[in-house]
Image (cartoon, helix red, strand yellow):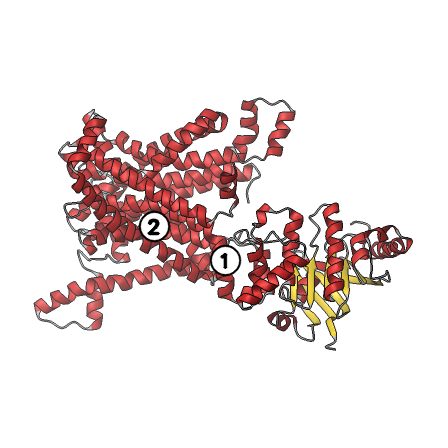
Amino acid sequence: MPAPSVIIGAFAGNGAMLWGDLVQTFFKGALSGYVIGCSAGILTAILIHRSLFLRRGLLPVGNFLAALPIVGTAPIFVMWFGFGWQSKAAVVIAMVYFPMLINMVEGLSSSDAMQRDLMKTYAASYWQTMFKLTLPAAMPFAFNGLKICTTLSLIGAIVAEFFGSPTLGIGFRISTEVGRLALDVVWAEIIVAAVTGTVFYGLVAASERGVTFWHPSIRGRSAS
Amino acid sequence: MIKVTALVLPVTTVVLAIIGIWYLFAFSLNSQWAEDQAARAGVELTATELWAATMSQDRPRLATPHQVAAELWDTTINKKVTSKRSLIFHGWVTLSATLLGFVIGTMLGILLAIGIVHNRAMNLSVMPWAIASQAIPILALAPMIIVVLHSVGLSGLLPKACISAYLSFFPVVVGMVSGFRSPNQMSLDLLDTYAASRPQIFWKLRLPASMPYLFTSLKVGAAASLVGAIVGELPTGAVAGLGARLLVGSYYGQTIQIWSALFAAAALAALLVGLIGLAQKVTLRQMGMAR
Amino acid sequence: MSEHAISAVDLGLEFPTRDGKIEALQQINLEVESGEFIALIGPSGCGKTTFLRIVAALEKPTSGVIRVNGLSPEEARKARSYGYVFQAAGLYPWRSIAANVRLPLEVMGFDRRERDDRVRHALDLVGLSGFEKQFPWQLSGGMQQRASIARALCFDADILLMDEPFGALDEIVRDHLNEQLLALWQKTGKTVGFVTHSIPEAVYLASRIVVMSPRPGRITAVIENDLPTERPLEIRDSSEFIAIAQKVRHALRAGGDAHD
């Protein structure tokens, strides 16, 4: 394990390289996959919410698929979409889609019967109920999924690089520098990844506080 | 709670739909290659011939379900368990690392949770670190851990198990802290009126109350362990295990091998989660907590 | 028949269970004039809530005819003929008090200016002016229930359906809200259907008391309440009040078997 001063030195000496790796892995691979995968999960959940049949069928299957080691699809996606960031984004999409979907499906059914009856007495349309009741009530679950997916997206993007990447990216750098025993650079990359992961998670958690300020779990925390 | 029978038809429909979509994708992804081959040979393919050609390639872009099924059959039933080509052999390598890591991670998680619930200082100091530890994409560390442990003479099962343990302890800590804290104030007050000691409160109230939480977090932890073991196999030179099969498959473009390794991993995940689910059912029913 | 706010003829609702059919309602005949305050009282399982839910088209009868303002419940709902107050306030925690009261107005497509006027007016009616920006969880249970009444009032439906709205509140708050509700009814002249299991509450509020009993759910008595419309809380100590309360208690005892 290299001394902290050596790692700081690695930061100073490789600033541009570290930034390039971060852009490649996080902004191009993880973030685009996260946005696409989570939106797809949310939209699917909203679309199938109307059909009890689809909900019943998809929930167990989605639960099962979400428990699978989806990272394993990385070699396939690298084969399909090439070494660039597109294949990393595809892995991330595959990884975040199902956790997001099942959280959202559960969230959409979390409004209680009385609240739904209330909308009924107003003769509210399906989509009015969706936007005024079902979606707001689903937000705590949605953010649960969004938070889980931040970590998954970074893992997906980094691990996918182990299966082939252009000559930059956090995962690529770690695996090559480990081979050359340049542990200071490896640690610098790990710190970059850790800080990015924490900040990403923190941003999502902060927007959760903003959106679901009303939820008992958030209310309780801010009060104490 | 919906009856299981009410789920059979919807689930079957969804699964069949997925298989159908898979075939369509296989056709469209593989047809380019088949057409190129045909053009090179100077023959025109009819629609049925094209369909047949996309379903039976050696290195398809997307292996078809029946190809994967055949490969799975071939590498499990037709090979000796000790053979390097047996998927059962590779599956066992991964499973043993998963189980070891899972057990370590779960024990650690439960112990930490007990500490957090009973000790104010631990509550304040451990929890933030546990959360921070998960913000790190730990799998990025996997090659590091493997290489470092290798250099101090540790190789094989234990390094992989370490990664599994690291990934699985967190869901257990979080779940068990909620579980141990789930009894309401009234139940706690009741035991206080009996002047119960803290160990008594733990054994008589907190532990039983935490059982539903335990099984839920065990399921998450088991799935995470498996991912850890598979990724832990990637940088070890791809000797054995499902992760190694994935890597070798991707080196040589053996898509069918990749898919069958994925399915083996899926089966392991299903097995682990299913066993935990079974234990959950039995335990909760015996405790009268079954829903 | 359209002058009746609510009219039920031979109304019945049964549903199958594992142990055979259960008759939640049987042979319900009831006519409610516009502007009446009807209390439905009875032990649990007598179908009083079910009846209210049928009026609100939240439940479908299996036999008989029901008309609300001369329309079927479904049509009446589409015409937004009634406001419904549930047992719990059921305010949306992500909306402020004003936004909660505004909810039905948004759904029904009122324009912005009118919405604000109506919200202000409704909150004023229930004595919640000044709490517009608060969130439900910052208010006491009684205030939450008042907000939910404002929510039912704001779109000015002519029928108000209330399902044990004060059941979960303590007696002091309840007295206070009863007083306010009575004043509100006299001011607005709405038709009110009010489910309760409290005899004093029914006698204090209603112009007519419908006594129901379970297995099968049915009406066993309809008692006219001839107390003056002006009813201070102290009226509950008067002999007239006690006499009507006694009538109701007798009807309840005659209808319900001892095992309740």
Q: Which element is circle 1 on? A: helix
Question: Can you say whether C208 is above or below A219 in the image?
Answer: below
> Tag 2 or tag 1, which sits nearer the N-term?
2
Question: Can you say whether C188 is above or below B193 in the image?
Answer: below
Most distant residue in the bottom direction:
C1
| Quarter of the image where the N terminus of chain C is located | bottom right
Three-letter residue code for mark 2? Val
Quadrant of the image occupied by residue B196: top right
Q: Which element is circle 2 on? A: helix
Instruction: Give percent across and percent down for residue C55.
Output: 68, 66
Task: Tell me, yes or no, whether dots 1 and 2 are on the same chain.
Answer: yes
Q: Nearer the viewer, mark 1 or mark 2?
A: 1
Most distant residue in the right direction:
C239
Name the residue located 49 percent from the left edge and 39 percent from the top edge. A221
Name the residue located 55 percent from the left edge and 45 percent from the top edge. B291
Q: Residue A96 carries which label?
A: 2
Relative side of B73 to C236, left or right:
left
Q: Which mark is residue A134?
A: 1
Residue A84 is at least partly visible in this image: yes
Query: To which chain does the residue with label 2 belong?
Result: A
Three-letter residue code for mark 1? Thr
Q: Nearer the viewer, residue C199 or B286?
A: C199
Query: To which chain does the residue with label 1 belong?
Result: A
Question: Can you say whether B2 is above or below B111 in the image?
Answer: below
Q: Nearer the viewer, residue B94 or C61?
A: C61
Q: How crowded is mark 2: few (under 14 residues within 10 Å), some or many (20 or more)?
A: many
Quadrant of the image occupied by residue A191: top left
Task: State the CA–CA distance, disc 1 to disc 2.
Answer: 22 Å
Instruction: Give percent across and percent down for residue B141.
Output: 25, 35
Instruction: Give percent across and percent down for residue B178.
Output: 49, 36
